[in-house]
Amino acid sequence: MTPGVRPLIAGNWKMHGLRADGLALARAVAEGARGLDAELVVCPPATLIAAVAEALAGTPVAVGGQDCHAREKGPHTGDISAPMLADAGARYVIVGHSERRAGHGETDAMVRAKAAAAFAAGLVPIVCVGESEAERLAGQAEAVVTRQLAGSLPEGFAARGGVVAYEPVWAIGTGRTPTEADIAAMHGAIRAHLARTAPEGAGVRLLYGGSVKPGNARAILAQPDVDGALVGGASLVAADFLAIAAAAGVSAGR
Ligand SMILES: O=C(CO)[C@H](O)COP(=O)(O)O
């Protein structure tokens, strides 16, 4: 954990949740969030953002989108713009998740445009980067992630409060995680890249994502330059998500 940084724990619900489930989950998270020394964000499917934002109004839990289009409006059937997310009550948006890079052909340039659109709409982008297993085995992990950062972060990213999430693709939903030393090494490399490219880079919050669970959260969050977590599966169970958030506060020594 970076000294003095308030941990950020974000839950990516992915394509899970009908209205009743989503509202119940959001309310349970809000109930348990009081008194936790971490910033909490839930990212429901787009259909639930407005309802969840309304349910969470006045609580310490913020709402985020899982993706946005790079344009404000236009003929883009099925897409959602950053201003629409903000209008629905979101404050954050995940962009460049590996499931979108792989499943929707998103390039670094597209991710950069989406992150810029998020800033323009007053949202905080959480930009995801991470290597595949083949890239890690080939010793390319750091080079891949550095290249993704160079291509995906818009001008002024650090100064405007952008967040980076390191999510090794092979750790997502698999129950496998890098070693703590590997996580620390990659977060250190990301920090060094950010600090080289902008004076404010040292203050960017760096999240780790990929099979974060209550059982491993404390050890992962205790690593240097890990300022929080982007949680998938475990964010669908309020008690697990809250346990991860509690571990963040402990790791921050608060
Ligand atoms: O999106 C993720 C968290 O946002 C990431 O895909 C990790 O998912 P998990 O392995 O199910 O935690």
Image (tube, rainbow, N blue to C red):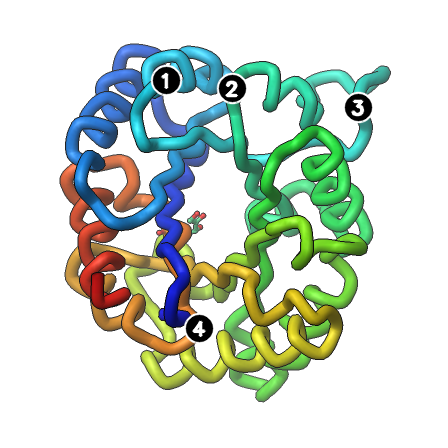
Mark 1: give few (<14), some (14-19) or many (20+) Cα within 10 Å.
few
CB of mark 1 within 8 Å of CB of mark 4? no
CB of mark 2 within 8 Å of CB of mark 4? no
What's the residue type where badge 4 is placed? Asp
Q: Earlier in the sequence, mark 2 or mark 3?
A: 3
Identify the residue shown where x is 19% and y is 62%. Answer: 250
Which residue bears the numbered disc 1? Answer: 57
Is residue 205 placed above or below 143 in the rendered structure? above
Identify the residue shown where x is 68% and y is 56%. Answer: 159
Identify the residue shown where x is 33% and y is 20%. Answer: 58
Along the line of sight, which residue is nearer the eye, 168 or 24? 24
Give how far across and how far down residue 142 sits, in percent: 60, 80
Is residue 75 placed above or below 144 in the rendered structure? above
Residue 72: numbered disc: 3
Along the line of sight, which residue is nearer the eye, 127 or 107? 127
Q: CA distance from mark 1 to mark 3?
A: 25 Å
Quadrant where the image shows the N terminus = bottom left
What's the residue type where badge 2 is placed? Gly
